Amino acid sequence: MISQKKKALLGVLCAAGLMAVAGCGENTPLDPKNPTSITVWTYYNGDQLSAFDGMVEEFNGTVGAEKGIVVKSVSQGSVNDLEANVLAAVRGEVGADEVPNIFMAYADTAYAIDQMGQVVDLKDYLTEEEKSAYIDSYIEEGDFSGIGEIKIFPTAKSLEVLVLNKTDWDVFAEATGASYDDLSDMEGLVATAKRYYEWTDAQTPDVQGDGRALFGRDAMANYMLIGSMQMGQEIFEVSDGKMTLHFDKAVARRLWDNYYIPFVKGYFAATGRFRSDDIKTGNIIAYVGSTSGVSFFPEAVSVSDSESYPIEMDVLPCPKFEGGDYAVQQGAGMVVTKGEEPEIYASVEFLKWFTADERNIKFSVDSGYLPVTKTANSKEAIVGSGAQIRDSMLKTLNVGVDMVNDNEMYTTKAFEGGNKARNILEYSLSDKAAADREIVVGRMTQGLSMEEAAAEFELDDNFDVWYEETLQRLQEFAQ
């Protein structure tokens, strides 16, 4: 009988050889008679958690039982909770759980844990053929050093799309001649939002300034990062974990003009926690959000506690700034932590099984994420998979697949303080817009027109102050 220690050594030797551990056949460190248990921490909730747990159950009852692997899925509740709990576990804090074998993470969190020496480089656990099956930018996201490392295993990705309350949009479009083409670029979106505000305002001629917002967006950092890339500039240029800052004033001004100004004037809005909440209350009729969040799109608009009406959803590509075909690459991957060789091997076996085309498509259909392999990321493959697809999810996946294939996918590389720097982009512009909008609304209640109330905030000096303050805060993280 080969000892567990010798089995682990065989696995290590196999991983270091010319072929990946996955191809080592009988040298597997697993023993079906003595199953290896691994724990996976996620931030999935709702439909996504149900879909993932269903996949785990299927694996445990089939391949897991055959090979000697038992997977336990644990949801940590939210992205922030997951990050905090992983860090506490790795640091060995009092009361923290044991470090999981696999945890979901975005690049910055994975990089921070890697700096603590707790992340496994999976490049030797995959053959070259297996690596090449994944969409290039997805597999490259976990290459922190630029030498071909795989420290984040891509399992499910998402991007941003424009989601519409088609029911109310159609009424507006019929009355004004507006079309979906008007929403393909940022300037067109702003012009259409202005038109919508004026059209709704005109419906009550005896009440001044009660026009409604057309649009809102989740994830402001994505707007600024991707918008800058589309204009030819990468805000956070990273090499070997060091960030060089490029926050050009002209680029920042265009970002400002196409979010802050329409927000202050009431053409854009953000009231609820997420923009799907604002769709539900009728505060907006369109928003940019993640494909993974489309499942939360409401089926009706609530006019009051006792009155509502049903709405239909539609999905369009995310509006761009003219100049570059970039789309945001988002969605956490899976990070494998240091441990015994059977645990690492079992973790990789589960992740490879999970991302096989038919299963990855099924998870995508159920959750709103996009498949991570090149062959699965096609409308033909998704429709031909035989999976039961809801109409809303089919619309989302159709647009999402085309966007992946038609754009260069972009996500910032990891660097020290990356989360904090990103948070500056997330809140600096949106928080100022929300605060100044309140002032405008207050002035309008005192009898000023919208243009009069907002005039102060359109001045160059207002932008200059915000820009210099934001630039100074970002410079703290440049190296």
Image (cartoon, rainbow, N blue to C red):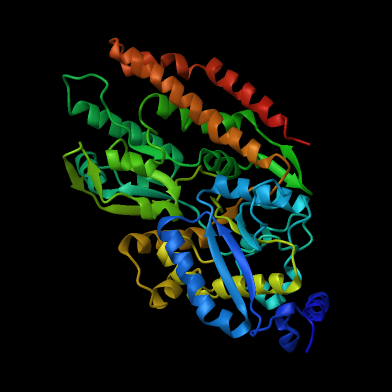
- Side of 243 where 17 appears, left or right: right
Location of residue 119 in the rendering, given as x and y in whole percent from the top left corner? 73, 59
- Side of 253 where 418 appears, left or right: right
From this viewpoint, is residue 156 visible?
no
- On screen, residue 365 above or below 29: above
For the residue pair 330 and 172, the one nearer the viewer reads as 330
Screen quadrant of the C terminus:
top right
Screen quadrant of the N terminus:
bottom right
The image quadrant that residue 134 belongs to is: bottom right
Residue at 66% from the left image edge and 81% from the top image edge: 34
Residue at 28% from the left image edge and 10% from the top image edge: 447
- Side of 309 where 381 appears, left or right: right
Location of residue 354 in the rendering, given as x and y in whole percent from the top left corner? 55, 72
- On screen, residue 12 above or below 39: below
For this orientation, the residue located farthest to the front is 95
Residue at 54% from the left image edge and 60% from the top image edge: 74
Location of residue 236 in the rendering, given as x and y in whole percent from the top left corner? 68, 41
Location of residue 312 in the rendering, given as x and y in whole percent from the top left corner? 25, 53
Q: How many dots with numbers?
A: 0
The image quadrant that residue 51 belongs to is: bottom left
The image quadrant that residue 407 belongs to is: bottom right
Residue at 49% from the left image edge and 30% from the top image edge: 430
For the residue pair 369 and 69, the one nearer the viewer reads as 69
- Side of 313 where 187 appears, left or right: right
- On screen, residue 31 above or below 321: below
From this viewpoint, is residue 397 visible?
yes
For the residue pair 8 and 367, the one nearer the viewer reads as 8
